[in-house]
Amino acid sequence: MKAPISKRTRKILDNPQLAKQLMLAIIADRLVERSMISEDERPTIKVDGEELKLVRLKAFDKK
């Protein structure tokens, strides 16, 4: 059984521009994980005026 998708995640996935930003954030997460970029270089995603920073692949933190 799949876990339900949150409203915020659905909003990101339904918007091609936000989905592209999410993909870039996931790539950046991997680069931070491999110490190729610093934590400060991690991108943010803007949803409904809120800036979100990818903390872990499945968790967002308000900036």
Image (spheres, rainbow, N blue to C red):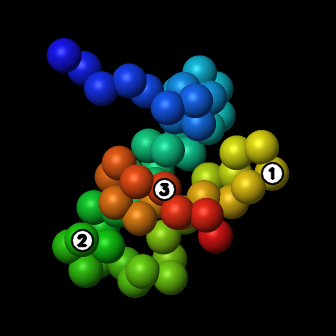
Q: Which residue is mark 3?
A: 60
Q: Which residue is mark 2?
A: 33
* Relative vertical location of residue 38 with respect to residue 44 in this rendering, above or below: below
Q: Which residue is mark 1?
A: 49
The answer to whether marks 2 and 3 mark residues whose Cβ atoms lie closer than 8 Å is no
Label 3 sits on what residue type?
Answer: Phe
Of mark 3 and mark 1, the one earlier in the sequence is: 1
**Disc 1 to disc 2, C-alpha distance:** 28 Å
Q: Is residue 2 left or right of residue 28?
A: left
**Which residue sits at x=25%, y=80%?**
35
Of mark 2 and mark 3, the one earlier in the sequence is: 2
Which residue is nearer to you in this view: 2 or 34? 2
Mark 1 vs mark 2: give the one in front.
Answer: 1
Q: Residues within 10 Å of mark 1 (few under 14, many from 20)?
A: few
The answer to whether marks 3 and 1 mark residues whose Cβ atoms lie closer than 8 Å is no
Label 2 sits on what residue type?
Answer: Glu
Tag 1, which secondary structure? loop
**Disc 2 to disc 3, C-alpha distance:** 16 Å
**Residue 27 visible to an observer of this rendering:** no
Label 1 sits on what residue type?
Answer: Gly
Which residue is nearer to you in this view: 27 or 7? 7
**Disc 3 to disc 1, C-alpha distance:** 15 Å
**Which residue sits at x=33%, y=52%?**
57
Tag 2, which secondary structure? helix
Q: Residues within 10 Å of mark 3 (few under 14, many from 20)?
A: some
**Residue 46 visible to an observer of this rendering:** yes
